[in-house]
Image (cartoon, rainbow, N blue to C red):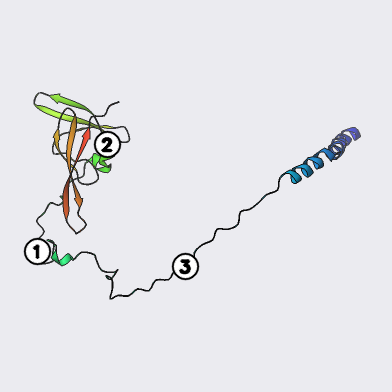
Amino acid sequence: MQRLKLIPLFGFTTLLTACGGDMSDLELFIDETKQAHHGKVDPLPEFPPYQTYTYDPLDIRDPFRPQTDLSASPIAADTEYTGPRPEATRRREPLEGYPVDSLKMVGLLQQQTQTWGLVKDPEGTIHRVQPGNYAGQNHGKIIQVSETKIEIVELVPDGLSGWVNRDAQLAMAED
């Protein structure tokens, strides 16, 4: 039993003596490396001094007012806006969750007089669409499906509290 207690002590002693030794080759390598590499830091670039700006309200427009006169727009408070606008009560369709440029037309399906376009979304799901369906995040309504493309009219804000129509299309994907 006495010998079994000496084995770990002997192993520990051997381990400690193995850590010491001649390290002159390592010290020589470090000295050579220090002499061979002399770092140099480039000086900081010169920056021009900051120029202050004095705002003179008599010479330029007020930065806190709109650039356009909203009272002259067709959407003045006393008039009813008659231009295009999104249907607020319409139920959204699955393809309205993706931008139009991320959708791809991948095929056409015809059955007697009925024609559908096949559209692939970014997740890889294929949807069957026809005129009257919606696609894209800008209230895009599909107006025509042909063999080579699907024509869409999007409804985008004009920046003055109104809406304008913008044409878009999905061309047949060439895979």
Quadrant hosting residue 52 = bottom left
Disc 2: which residue: 103
**Left or right: 122 with respect to 50?**
left
Residue at 19% over, 29% down: 148
Q: Is residue 49 left or right of residue 10?
A: left
Residue under label 1: 79
Where is mark 3, residue-wise?
Answer: 50
Q: Can residue 3 be seen in the rendering of this structure?
A: yes
For label 1, count other residues whose C-alpha is less than 10 Å away and answer few (under 14), some (14-19) or many (20+): few
Where residue 138 appears, as percent x and y from the top left, is 22, 47
Q: Along the polypeptide, which appears first: circle 3 or circle 1?
A: 3
Split into 4 quadrants, where in the image is the C terminus?
top left
Whether residue 89 can be seen here: no
Q: What residue is rendered at 25% in x and 40% in y? A: 100
Return the x and y of residue 113 as percentages of the image width and height. 8, 26
Q: Give the amino acid type for the residue marked by disc 1 in the picture.
A: Thr
- Front residue (pair 96, 90): 96
Are circles 3 and 2 on residues that touch, CB within 8 Å?
Answer: no
> Is disc 3 placed on a helix, strand or loop?
loop
